[in-house]
Image (cartoon, rainbow, N blue to C red):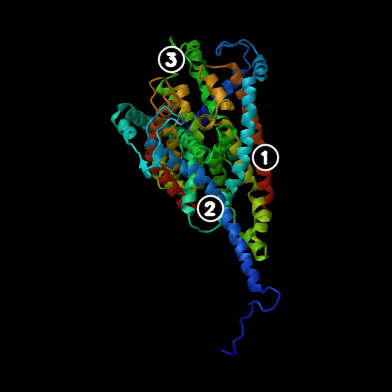
Amino acid sequence: MSDFTPPQGLPSKGKPSRLVRLWTRLRTINMGRSAVITIPSLWLGIFFFIPFLVVFKISLSESAIAIPPYTAMFAWNPEDAYLTIKASFSNYLFLFQNDFYLDAYLSSIRIAAVSTFFTLIIGFPIAYMIARSKPTMRTLLLSLVILPFWTSFLLRVYAWIALLKKNGVINEFLMSSGLIDHPLIMLQTNFSVYLGIVYTYLPFMILPLYTTLEKMDITLLEASEDLGAKPYQTFFLVTLPLAVPGIVAGCLLVFIPAVGEFVIPSLLGGSNTLMIGRVLWDEFFLNRDWPMASAVAIVMLVLLVGPIMFMRSRSKREEV
Amino acid sequence: MERRSWFLKSSALFGFIFLYAPIISLIIYSFNASKLVTVWGGWSLKWYSSLFQNDEIMTAAVLSFKIATISATLAAILGTMAGFVLSRMGSFRGKTMLGGWVTAPLVMPDVITGLSLLLLFVAMESIFGWPAGRGEVTIIIAHTTFCLAYVAVVVQSRLSSMDETLEEAAMDLGAKPGVLFFLITLPLIAPAIISGWLLSFTLSLDDLVIASFVSGPGNSTLPMVIFSKVRLGVTPEVNALATLMILAVSVAVIAAIVIMRRQTKFQSP
């Protein structure tokens, strides 16, 4: 091996070779790359993911008069060097044995589902009309849909109180026009909660619907009409099936947050409007029972993980 | 055909009335001289002057604007990084997980996010001694976390709809990754980052539930003050405040639309 010659590019004399320079450059790229990946991942890991583990841990402890108001899970006894782990499922047992909580979950799901359905019924014609209007008109109409979404959610819910009250705008109008004799009771009912959810979440339904409807090939509709389909047949056999991705995306965007809604039932709902977000709030702020509130949150999370994963897988498929 | 478009137009018109009627009635009644909502006492600006004299609302408004500015800026930086990582960095370990962490906060009910962050802060305080107590800092962290997700989604969709030829050309011409990002990619996604920032700002300004969980005593944000007033019934001062906020947002959104339109006109040949 006496005639061994170093391959070209390996460091020979003082000046670093091209390969070395490339290596150092690659290393800095990798460092920059991993920094850009790590920083947001670390932030979300600490402030979005780990909190769920903390909630789960505290849901297994018991309420106590202390600061913070729950019993410790790990106790370290320095004398005999024993680590005691105390976990109790009593909160979950209480939750599943008590009709109150089950009713709250079921009624939240029902209210969210009914509201989602009405959001779809109201949102679809709007999205369809925007998708079929002239391009200049389209931007204007789309901005009109988005504008309320940018204004305060809390204030938009609040605006309905003045409209729905017993002596509110709607009742005064109906009474003065002679349509009704006695004011309708609309506020503090389940009706006003449905209305509030439909109203505030409508843009979340319209936008994904619009995106799908706008991409739809209009020649398919013409073909269907040419082949003799009646308008309603075209709608149910062509338009609707093609709009399914938008419908699913819109429904998930409305349904999932609506299940845990707190502001709408507490401002527009009555004392008998049972929603789980409100139960969690009261458990935490009124009863100061942090472990119970945590257990309520964990069960809600388990209910919603399915729909959230489904939404995620669909959005990923669309990216591809 | 004629009848169907008539049906569509009227139902869409109904939809738009539904969207705007509450907002318009709120604005009109903010100028009502009478304290009663339904009695019209003539035009007046007195609720505006009493709004500006209300120290509780004004202090909360200043705090909310400060929190919204800081969290929107942090969220814009971190969210741009997350969106960029997810759409331009190929595959890496934990990509699916990061993708999930970016999507989930968008639909996560506020009560869960608020409770879980509060319990995290309490646990962190007892283990590391930080954050000492709760207030501005904890609200900023909480708002940054959920706004980050919105920015990431906006940036990601902008990046995936943008073709990569400009970036490839810069790379072929020897631009280093950092130079490539700051000179080519960043200017191209700037509109998305700006709209992400604005969205974060309004979301932070609007959040009641998460802030209620993670704030400490004496740190009431504007939505918390509004909520405590509104729970007791309709207050004309809140109508005046709402009108001012709606006005500000409308001006900002219209300006943003005009700027975006000019940009797209400039970009398309």
Compute the Cα span from label 1 to label 3.
44 Å
Amino acid identity at mark 2:
Leu
Q: Badge 2: few (under 14), some or many (20 or more) residues near its Cα, within 10 Å?
A: many
Q: Badge 3: few (under 14), some or many (20 or more) residues near its Cα, within 10 Å?
A: some
SS at mark 2 in the image: helix
**Residue of label 3:** A184
Residue B86 marker: 2
Compute the Cα span from label 2 to label 1.
29 Å
**Residue of label 1:** B258
- Which residue is at 56% across, 43% downward? B148
Compute the Cα span from label 3 to label 2.
52 Å
> Residues at badges 2 and 1 in contact (C-beta under 8 Å)?
no
Q: Badge 1: few (under 14), some or many (20 or more) residues near its Cα, within 10 Å?
A: few
* View extreme (right): residue: A14
Amino acid identity at mark 3:
Leu
Of marks 2 and 1, which one's residue comes earlier in the chain? 2
